[in-house]
Amino acid sequence: MYYAAFEGTVPEEKNALSGRFYNTLLPKLKQIDGFTDESGFVSRSDKHTSLTLSRWEDVAALKRWRNEETHLRIQNKASSDVYSWYRLRIGPSETHDGIEHDEDGMARIMVMVHKPKDAEKQVAHGIEALIDRDAGGDGWNGLVDFDEYEGETGLLWLTGWRTPFDAARFMNAIRADSGSVTCVRVERDYTKVERRQAPSETPGVRQED
């Protein structure tokens, strides 16, 4: 299973345009062979920042979506006209002990914790809310980035880790009642400032390297 985590900040005056773009793309997204599902979340610290998390059968399905002509054209337009910031991370789900280091000795790992919504219980903010103190240690050494999101399906903590060891220590320290945990080996990671996109295979559409 492949995951694509797209985080984006949309200024309030751009919400209408962002909505039109999304409504145009959604029917085309659902037609892509290998697309599984998609969930939307809003940052608990910034209402203008959202997370779209999609699941795919394999990397070939993602390539089909990446090279869909309407998607490419709207993506290029939204990059300049809608988002003040965005970040996209893509990779397969794996066990943390199956992830190898990059050549520089660092691994890019994303760990997601999803807790279904419980109307009877208010969940505390911060990564501390996930950690079982009895597991030993603080559990977040090696944390590179962290954000909390909330959506119709519940809460989602999105974390980035320096090494497989750091990710494993965090996963072992997570409270049993925190929710489902997914570990992703990040193969592609780029932002609006640092765009390292794969080249387009669609004629007439230019992608930045």
Image (cartoon, helix red, strand yellow):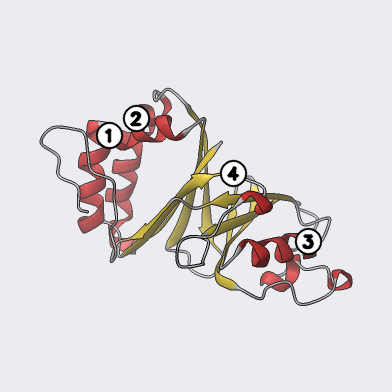
149 to the left or right of 139: left
Q: Which residue is label 1 attached to?
A: 67
| Residue 117 visible within the image | no
Q: Which residue is label 4 attached to?
A: 93
Residue at 19% x, 47% y: name it: 207
Which numbered disc, 1 or 4, marks the residue closer to the eye?
Answer: 4
The x, y position of residue 8, in whole percent, is 39, 58
> Of helix, strand and loop, which one carries label 3?
helix
What amino acid does circle 3 point to? Asn
The x, y position of residue 111, in whole percent, is 61, 56
Quarter holding the C terminus is bottom left
Instruction: Between residue 36 and residue 11, name the one nearer to us.
Output: 36
> Of helix, strand and loop, which one carries label 1?
loop
Comes first in the chain, label 3 or label 1: 1
Q: Which mark is residue 64?
A: 2
Q: Which residue is label 3 attached to?
A: 172
Asked whether disc 2 touches disc 1, contact meaning CB atoms under 8 Å apart, the reply is yes
> Of helix, strand and loop, which one carries label 2?
helix
What amino acid does circle 4 point to? Ser
What amino acid does circle 2 point to? Arg
The x, y position of residue 41, in whole percent, is 53, 52
Residue at 81% x, 61% y: name it: 175
Distance from Cα at disc 3 to Cα at disc 1: 38 Å
Asked whether disc 3 touches disc 1, contact meaning CB atoms under 8 Å apart, the reply is no
Comes first in the chain, label 4 or label 3: 4
Few, some or many C-alpha atoms within 10 Å of disc 4 (few <14, some 14-19, many ≥20)? some
